[in-house]
Image (cartoon, rainbow, N blue to C red):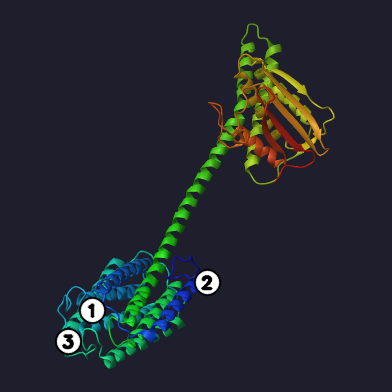
Amino acid sequence: MTQDHLGLFDTPPSRRQIRSGMAIVGLIYLVLALTLPFRNVLLGEVDAFIPIVDSVMIVCALITATLLYAKSAVFRSRALAALASGYVFAGSMLTAHLLTFPGAFAPGGLLGAGVDTTAWTAVFWRGALPIAALLYVALKRPDQGPQPATGRPATRIGLGVLAAIVLAGALTLLAIGGEDLLPPLMANRVDSNYANLASAQMLLVALDLLAIAILYRKRGSALDFWLLVSLSAWLAQLLLSAALHSRFSVGFYALNVIMLISNLVLMLALIAESYRLHMQLALARSARKREREARLMSMEAVTGAIAHEVGQPLTAATTNGLVSMHWLTQVPPDLDKAIPALRENLDSVRRTSDVITSIRAMFAKGAVPATEVSLNDLVRETVVLLHRELASGKVALDLELDEALPPILADRVQIQRVLLNLFNNAIESVGATHGRPRRISVRSAPQDGEEVLLEFSDTGVGIAPGETEHIFDAFVTTKATGTGLGLSLCRTIVEEHEGRLWASPGAGHGATFHLQLPRDRAPAT
């Protein structure tokens, strides 16, 4: 079963990673080639050099082990746990190397060991990575993936750490007290017993080459690749170490720099991968949050649209119902006035049903029904529906409708919703003014034979500078009790009809809304 890649352990190396790894290996072997001719040239002793380098490598080894143990807990992988334990062992042996190195903290080392102790701790330490890599390959399963949270990974990790520390302690004791059991590697504090030291280093070279060959043959992940890079750097320092005759030479200092780089490689790759996974998690959570907010926004938009659009005809139906009840309860009942009010009530109920159907079609997929519509007739019909609002607000209406205006192909109910919104906004705008005439002008005109234009101008409060575009954004409103959905829905409807809706400041006061629609194009499906 295919699954998402979760990190270096189950992800193939990218081309960029391969190029970077090859560049690191090439740089290391370039340093090796430049150093070899001068490897035994003695330099001055720097007492702080080994403590600094060993301390950095100890920290690198422990960080690498921690990251590998974390991945082993996720993947339930014995291979990763074995590799992590190898780095714990390496860090422990480096600690012994630091404490026994003559001159680092004391002339003969803090542990008071002989001249061979430090050399043998270095040999044991240098064998850690190749052996850990071989165990990693032997225990690795090709179908390894994240496993359910079963078992006790913390216990296994604890046992691995304990085993690595106990083994490192035992080898350290052997290096300290086993001068009679181990062949001498150093003639004195500076000079080596070259034959024995070179033999030990060549055994390590053979072990490292074996690990490289087996890992290369069974490589498959980015972790395998970076481990190969580390082993290749390890090989370079082993070759240089085998060629050295003494400490504190050009080769000695270059050797420690190469060792430092080889320890940094895998750690930096794991840290970079952890950062990448963290960023992916953060982006995924952010996208999930945006998706949830968008879903909630869509639901709010639908409910807001229903409340906004259905509210108008329902208010009219309620008003007409109250008027008809008033005339019917008179003594005697005034049927001549009650019957027209009841008819208007029925028209309002019918418009409510049409609006609900239109909103449902607007948020659903599929074609929108389109018919031939006369914009002039639709404007006049809308004026009749709003005659009470116009009269109660004492708003004068000027209609400049071009009788030669051609019909358009559109959804009649949706276009009327646009007109109702534009009229209501204009009525509310002029109603908020004082001391000047309340007037709304509507003008229609054909354009280029392909489009028609309606312009709604009012003498209301107008639009603030820079807000002519924002007023069409959802949930943006200048009214204390507004929902901010009216103009947004209007623009959506117009754009579905492949038209345009925009606003501009009025000539003196107020604002002008421009509605441009094509003549013979159906709404978008």
Marks 1 and 3 in Cβ contact (< 8 Å): no
Residue lying furthest top:
331
Q: CA distance from mark 1 to mark 2?
A: 39 Å
Q: CA distance from mark 2 to mark 3?
A: 48 Å
User: What amino acid is at disc 1?
Assistant: Leu
Q: Residues within 10 Å of mark 3 (few under 14, many from 20)?
A: some
Tell whether 18 sits left or right of 486.
Answer: left
Q: Which residue is mark 3?
A: 178
Q: Quadrant of residue 373?
A: top right
Q: Position of residue 135 (x, y in %)?
A: 35, 80
Q: Nearer the viewer, residue 86 or 137?
A: 86
User: What amino acid is at disc 2?
Assistant: Arg
Q: Dot 2 lies on which element?
A: helix
Tell whether 298 sits left or right of 62.
Answer: right
Name above or below for residue 385 compared with residue 277.
Answer: above
Q: Which residue is mark 1?
A: 167
User: Mark 3 or mark 1, which is nearer the start of the sequence?
Assistant: 1
Q: Does any portion of residue 12 appear in the rendered image?
A: no
| Mark in the foreground, 1 or 3 | 3
User: Mark 2 or mark 1, which is nearer the start of the sequence?
Assistant: 2
Q: Does any portion of residue 34 appear in the rendered image?
A: yes
Label placed on residue 15: 2
Q: Dot 1 lies on which element?
A: helix
Q: Residues within 10 Å of mark 1 (few under 14, many from 20)?
A: some
Residue lying furthest right:
404
User: Mark 3 or mark 2, which is nearer the start of the sequence?
Assistant: 2
Name above or below for residue 261 compared with residue 213.
Answer: above
User: What amino acid is at disc 3?
Assistant: Gly
Name above or below for residue 283 compared with residue 203.
Answer: above
Q: Nearer the viewer, residue 231 or 193?
A: 193
